């Protein structure tokens, strides 16, 4: 085996590369919450998020190198495969790159990225081992989603970016639960944290995947996807013509030849489906997608958490943390679907198989 391969493997372990697949969904969910399509600014936000996330991974191991020498001697730094100065230099370079990418979008995005970078460094260098640690990690993940929203909206669209606050809160709540579990992943011995995370998972799944009245995003109301223009006006406008009132769909209509109630769709002017039926079909489809993604979220997070609750050993606790990290992808997708962005939701969900595949080769914890 060449020397290049072990070095690449060591850096993949240090940066926890499989966890990278959980990052783009933050910005995409934030973009969906603004009721705008993802754009080139969204891509810059994703690049910034990836850099800042990996900076946190490198800095985490640099800060914990003494502790890992006892609890995880196989990690890249205590095993000597990567030197501490190299890890610190990587964390610094990635942070600078992430901030530079955010600065290309505008001052609001740079301010959000700066707050995110500050939270990451504060967590890794100090807050991690304090009671404020889980809250700091949750804040970092919420800020990452807000970075995507701020970048997508651009300058002068403050209200659009603020619309992402509920989604950021949901993602932060999940992160908080997973981080609390992770504080015992090296020692094990507590069922309370996995049980609490299970309860949080169920509550969040109900919130993002619930039926009518659960509260959707800007694009989740009647009339369709907030990211698609014209659905409401086109179909609703079609039923106001004389064809509807003058017998266009009446009992022996020469236009349609249909009797009332004989078709699943009422026909409006020009033979187009009635807007109420199309709107109901779109709502049903969006709700089905939300429900499916919420189930995928529960399925990814709940099983390992349940096992860790039954037997809180270090290996099972680590699996629970890994499951919680991977569960962020279907949660992000469900948040996008909740905002009415079905295409963005499907794109985000498509990252899950890759994350699962690479997690078999390199641990995400």
Image (spheres, helix red, strand yellow):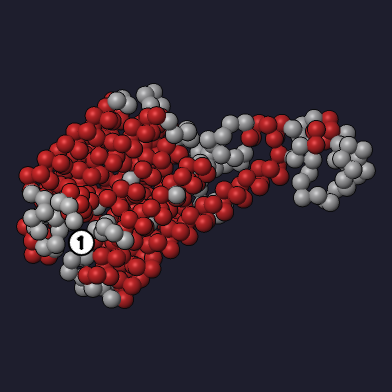
Residue 85: where, in percent of width, then height?
Answer: 7, 44
Residue 327 is at least partly visible in this image: yes
Task: Say which of 245 and 120 sits in front.
Answer: 120
Q: Residues within 10 Å of mark 1 (few under 14, many from 20)?
A: some
Residue 247: quadrant of the picture: top right
Residue furthest out toward the front: 1
Task: Pinpoint residue 115: horizontal percent, then vertical percent.
Answer: 23, 37
Q: Is residue 68 left or right of residue 305?
A: left
Count of all numbered marks drawn on residues in the image = 1
> At 33% across and 45% down in the image, what residue appears?
23
Of the pair 115 and 325, the residue shown nearer to us: 325
Q: Mark 1 highlights which residue?
A: 183
Q: Is residue 31 left or right of residue 276?
A: left
Secondary structure under badge 1?
Answer: loop
Quadrant (top left, top right, bottom left, bottom right) of the N terminus: bottom left
User: Which quadrant of the rendered structure holds the C terminus?
Assistant: bottom left
Across and down, in percent, residue 330 comes to: 43, 53
Quadrant location of residue 321? Answer: bottom left
* In this picture, residue 133 sits left or right of residue 354: left
Residue 135 in view of the camera: no
Residue 15: percent from left, percent from top? 22, 49
- Residue shown at 66% from the left, 47% from the top: 281
Q: Residue at x 54, y 52 (%)?
A: 289
Nearer to the camera, 34 or 97: 97
Q: Residue at x 21, y 65 (%)?
A: 185
The answer to which quarter of the image holds residue 54 is top left
């Amino acid at each position: 085996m060449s020397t290049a391969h072990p070095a690449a493997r060591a850096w993949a372990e240090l940066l926890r590369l499989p966890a990278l697949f959980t990052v783009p969904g933050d910005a995409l969910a934030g973009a969906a919450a603004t009721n705008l399509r993802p754009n080139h600014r969204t891509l810059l936000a994703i690049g910034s998020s990836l850099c800042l996330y990996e900076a946190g991974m490198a800095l985490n191991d640099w800060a914990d190198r003494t502790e890992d020498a006892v609890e995880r001697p196989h990690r890249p730094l205590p095993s000597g495969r990567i030197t501490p100065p190299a890890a610190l230099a990587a964390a610094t370079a990635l942070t600078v790159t992430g901030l530079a990418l955010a600065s290309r979008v505008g001052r609001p995005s740079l301010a959000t990225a700066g707050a995110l970078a500050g939270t990451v460094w504060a967590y890794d260098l100090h807050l991690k081992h304090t009671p404020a640690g889980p809250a700091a990690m949750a804040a970092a993940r919420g800020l990452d989603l807000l970075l995507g929203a701020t970048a997508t909206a651009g300058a002068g669209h403050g209200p659009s970016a603020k619309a992402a606050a509920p989604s950021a809160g949901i993602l932060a709540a999940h992160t908080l639960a997973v981080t609390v579990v992770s504080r015992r992943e090296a020692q094990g011995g507590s069922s309370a944290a996995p049980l609490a995370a299970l309860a949080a998972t169920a509550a969040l799944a109900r919130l993002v995947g619930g039926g009518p009245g659960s509260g959707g995003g800007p694009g989740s109301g009647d009339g369709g996807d907030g990211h698609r223009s014209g659905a409401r006006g086109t179909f609703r406008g079609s039923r106001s013509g004389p064809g509807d009132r003058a017998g266009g769909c009446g009992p022996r209509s020469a236009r349609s030849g249909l009797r009332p109630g004989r078709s699943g769709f009422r026909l409006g002017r020009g033979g187009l489906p009635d807007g109420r039926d199309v709107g109901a079909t779109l709502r049903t489809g969006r709700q089905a997608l939300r429900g499916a993604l919420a189930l995928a979220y529960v399925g990814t997070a709940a099983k390992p958490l349940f096992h860790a609750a039954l037997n809180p050993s270090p290996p099972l606790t680590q699996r629970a943390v890994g499951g919680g990290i991977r569960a962020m992808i279907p949660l992000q997708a469900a948040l996008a679907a909740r905002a009415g962005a079905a295409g963005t939701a499907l794109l985000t969900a498509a990252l899950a198989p890759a994350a699962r595949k690479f997690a078999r080769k390199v641990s995400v914890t």
